[in-house]
Image: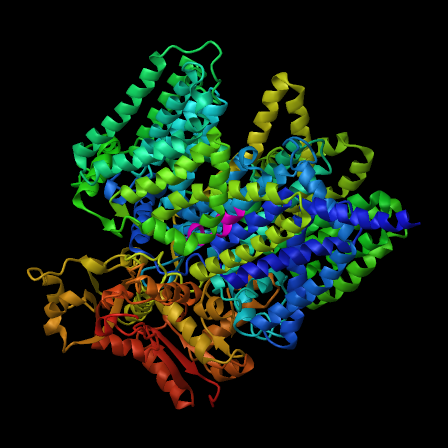
Amino acid sequence: MIIQRFTPLKAATKQVKRLISPLSIIVILAIIALTLRLLFLGERPFHHDESLDAWFSLRFLNGEYNGYDPVYHGPLRFYLTAAIFWLFGITDITARLLAAIAGFILVFAPLLWRKHIGIVGTIGAMTLISISPTMVYFSRFGREDSLFLLLTTSFVILFIAFLINPQGWHPTALFTTIILSMAIKESILLVIFLFGVLTLFLSLQESLSRIKKGTLERFPLLSSLLIPGFGLLSLTLTLIWVGDSGGNGTIIKIACYCGFLLLVIIGMRVIPSTEKHHQPEISIIKSLREPNLKQWSISLAIAGISFVALFSQFFTNFSGPNTTSAPHSALRNGLTAGFQYWSNQQSTGARGDSRWHYYLSMLIAYEWVILFIALFGVWKIIQQPTLFNQTIMWWALGGLIVYSWAAERMPWLIIHILLPTIIIAGLGIQHIWETVSTQKKRKQIACSAALVLLIFVAFQSIKTNFDDPGEPNELLVQAGQATPEVVAWTNQIFDLNRVFYAENEEHLSVQIDSDIFWPYGWYLRDFPTSTYAKITVGNTATLSASPDIIFLPQWDRDLAQNLVDEYAIFPYNHRWWWVPQYDAGLSNLADTQTLLTNWGKWMWNRTPWQNIQGNPNGCPSALAGHVYIKESVLSLAQKTEVWNSPHLTPSLIQGGSLC
Amino acid sequence: MNFLTAVFICSIVLIGFTTTYSIQSRLSFEERVMFGVVLGVIEVSIVGFLLSWAFSVNRTTIFISVGILLSVNSLIALRRRSVLAADYESLLIRCKRKWNDPLSPKVPIFLLVSSTLLTTRIMQIAYDGTDSGGVAVSHLSVYGDWSAHLAYAASFAYSNNFPPELPTAAGESFSYHFGVDWFSAMFVPLGLDLFSAMQTSTVLLASVLPPILFFGYKRFVTNNRAAVFALLIFLLSGGTAAFFRFLFQDLPEEGPSILLNLPRSYAFDGFDRNWVDNAVTGFLYPQRPTLVGFSALVIVIVLLWENRKLKITSTYVFAGTLVGVLPIFHIFSFGALLLLSTFWALTTMKRYWLRFFAPALLLGVPVLIWQWPDRDGRSWHQLWVLGKSTWNLHVIDFLWFWLLNTGLVIPIAALGIVRSSREIKRFAVPIFAFLIIPNIAIWHFWIGNNAKYVILFLLLSAPFIGEQIELLLKSGGLRKSLSVALLISLIFTGSLDVWRAMDKTTGPYPVEYLTGSDVLLGEWILKSTPTDATFASANTNAHPVRVLTGRSVVSGSPGRLNDLGVDWYSRDQDLRSIYQLQEGYGDLLARYQVTHLVLGPLEKLHYRLTPDYDRRIEEELILHGAELVYDRANYQVYDVQDLQ
């Protein structure tokens, strides 16, 4: 009787368990990830770089793209975005769709490593990628970083697969991934350097295992700490030594470092090996020998053809854009201009944030939960230094070192460090799960803690990405971010033009100073008369032509003095940003509370703080200026009820600060 | 697409999906989802329509409709949760099966993704902006038929058209299956503009049609490949005209680059030699009711087919109810299903068919009576278009006509049905009625409308053709080549036309559809005139009053009014009298209860008004009490309510 009563209950429990299978959870995660990436995707005003990417894609679609120029990075994303434009239309959403799709696919990367991470860790990592504030933010950001990270991840997946279980097709896939990455961004050089050095260290580890009996057995830590310890230390020291020399100096010093490692490896190989030497987990030589000559040849041929296709706009244009940064033919630009540009950038000084700890600070600000969980992962990696574990750790920490060394420090580069950190966090989650799952109480505590942290991360992510994500008190917002006024003025111009054209059968004449032309270049793409105007002391011809609407930055206001009578003038904010002092308020240890309060307020409701020196530039500021509208045009707009007052935000140049 | 629209669409899918659990049927999870989209659209449209009629068309009404349906259907899903869970589990298991496995969900998912992408492309280029702030269109379907659909949808979205009257002929009952246009109008209160509403609703319905057809066809063929062939044969139909016009005329003249700029439609030549257009560009795209109708037709057939042995009452009632509401959405599918089911019922003579016919007739006939046009549009003839246009009344022309318009569809379909099982044969025989009807009768005012029966024949016969091609392909050798040649012959013309529909710049398109001045006028009317205002305006193909505001007008485009059985001629003459200020024009304005008279470039061109006419009409109208209420950008609007 009792058994009969419990049978349906058991069946129901079984059914529920079946329904919350890993596959079901993955489906739910996919829906969450997709929603977070697509919802209100077009709402945030365009960043300067986003507008350029979209505009170049449009040029390619219209057959007007001149070819690869490293200033604007590789052409592949223009091709892909152009395809999206063709299919789904040309809108703000579709301009960001490629980043969103790449960011969505990235969620599934841990699935391919589920055997290494463990199923709980895999789902944990997928959850963190799905909802991490930074991952979501830059999956909704129309630059190339999301796509580049997807390709880097594909490269790492193939790299690990090639070393563990080499297949004949692996070189083709690896080379093609590198070429595709080259056609997206010059950062591929950093990836190649990072994984090239890792390969050398793995060879060194392999060589160590071959030398005479007793060496490794006596020093087991030598093997496990070789890469995370000695490897990362040597990488750091080398990059400090290389510094910001740029150009040939960088190449020579890096070559010296790699040459030294190579010599050590060769030296180790020379030492006679024991017959019963320690078998390494992998053998790089064996992996390299696995594909036959034909397969290597095919892989090189495919990579070569892909390179030519991508940099010649699919064999249609072999001449380059002929700019200072891309002066050669299309193919030569593809091969060398990227490196030259990057190398020059490295030597000419920092772009973005100049502080070496920028990425660390940002990670702590937005992703401290992931960093905290990743500590457990690091512990597991030290305990079990498998090839996978070491590679992921190298990718994360090596990436942090390399990107912190590189001269350009921008918020969108964080994701290149964050993703491998999340994989380590996945290892940590698996480790915690394995530790607590045997005891019910511990399991309950761990699950409760995980739930609290998950809610916190989700809350942070929603706040960062959906609660005015383009406002400068978000640290992820960079100086190129346009204010909402840009969108408001764009709509105003289109509305005004419609009325103006209907009345006069000619379009409004709009002149925008070259310093504030972007993102108008994108927003006004269909506007027939908007012009990129270089207005300087020696060149005010544009103004004397008396255009209907003029956009000028504050520093050019004097040039427009004689326009005052005929025009109505509106204050205007073009872009905004905040460069905070991370340790603001901390003059000695006793002030720790001020520091924590500043950060706490920021985390709770994104309240910015002033720099310790009281420098107003430490608070969010804006590139401001003025919009001049002919009185006759303004009165027409008001008469026809199309005047939307797009100048709502008070000008920041008056107060100088948003704090 | 905004957030509310996304929520609305998800709700529709959920409503329709859970509805499928109200009956006992052997549908798979993915079938329930795809069928659910169409069922959800029908349910939300009907409940939303009734509530909007009772209150008004706004966001609250629409979400209350959704809320009611979600609540009711949640209870159904909760009651059948064990079946739902089993379906879901089955889906997870079947996901691992190979593509050619009949139970694998991969093919329908692939079809859904492909059709979504293709439809999105076709729809996103449908409308574009112009430099002047106007609207450009890129396909004949949008330029032509969609002008009427825009007016219908706008009449609900902006002009509170309850009880429904034909907005293109003031005072006439809405003798049209407007369901899908009402559905589009529901997107407007959610934040979409009218054009996006039309595009979004079309993408939603068109995306699920191929998987739904696949599910239907699969039941009458031996494997997935045959079902896919059938799908292609229907969607890419178009006769054989392209073999000559493309391969022997256009391609040699222009070279391969012509593929990037196809100069003309190959399946349709403006009712000269080609009368049966491609299913997509001639029916699904321009004639929006087919989006619901074709899917619903297949769903009902699937339900009846699955129920042929089980004979579950609720399934018959459900199918009958679905057929009963079809006159609102697609009258031809309603008629087709009644015709087919009558045949099936007569051949079985079983009482359970009453459970099907009772709701179908009880719901359908009153709607049908309400929609029935005042004018009698019936006539009888022989052999459809033979003896008309450039076709002669010869045996050769008879054969040539069908070969040019449908290729080898008819003989292969006949062969397929003859070779099918007895059970399928009984099910399939009545579809030949759709070939007989157009050859003996015109029931719909104009001979060209008879193509709508032929397309129904194509829709229903496609699985039998697909099966024959698959059998040939499987038999190998020379027959394999023959099957490939046959398939190409059946889809080549249609493929070119569908490809052309995906191209934004095929001459003469894109063309300016509305100017910036038109749009300004439309905005002013929406802002400044009452929803029940009636306008006198030119009865050109597209006019801003109709397509942007949905306000009632004296006359829309005469051709389209003729299709609906409206006395277009009298209205056309009356408009001329009004604009030429002929004696008694005031009485005509009063007869149609015109409140506003529009005088713009279209009126001046259409009624050949002289340059000094502006002054004359102003004097005449103002003198008699009219008021000039809008005067901007070549348009004047007079309020003529107080005209004496």
Quarter containing the C terminus of chain A: bottom left
- A32 versus B602 height, above or below: above
Is there any visible trace of residue B494 in the rendered image? Answer: no
Q: Which residue is the extreme one toward the front?
A: A218
Front residue of this view, candidates B425 and A453: A453
Q: Position of residue B257 (x, y in %)?
A: 36, 35
Relative to A337, B368 lies left or right: right
Q: Main secondary structure of the magenta part?
A: helix
Q: Is residue A134 magenta?
A: yes
Q: Position of residue B268 (x, y in %)?
A: 51, 44
Which range is magenta? A126-137
Going 24% across and 35% down the picture, which residue do you hit?
Answer: A339
Is there any visible trace of residue A292 in the rendered image? Answer: yes
Relative to B524, A441 lies left or right: right
Q: Is residue B297 magenta?
A: no
Going 41% across and 24% down the picture, which residue do you hit?
Answer: A172
Front residue of this view, candidates A227 and B41: A227
**Quadrant of the image occupied by residue B602:** bottom left
Going 55% across and 52% down the picture, which residue do you hit?
Answer: A32
Q: Position of residue B36 (x, y in %)?
A: 67, 53
- B321 versus B569 height, above or below: above
Q: Position of residue A292 (x, y in %)?
A: 43, 14
Q: How has the structure been colored for display?
A: rainbow
Going 39% across and 31% down the picture, which residue do you hit?
Answer: A227
Front residue of this view, candidates B588 and A362: A362
- B534 versus A395 height, above or below: below
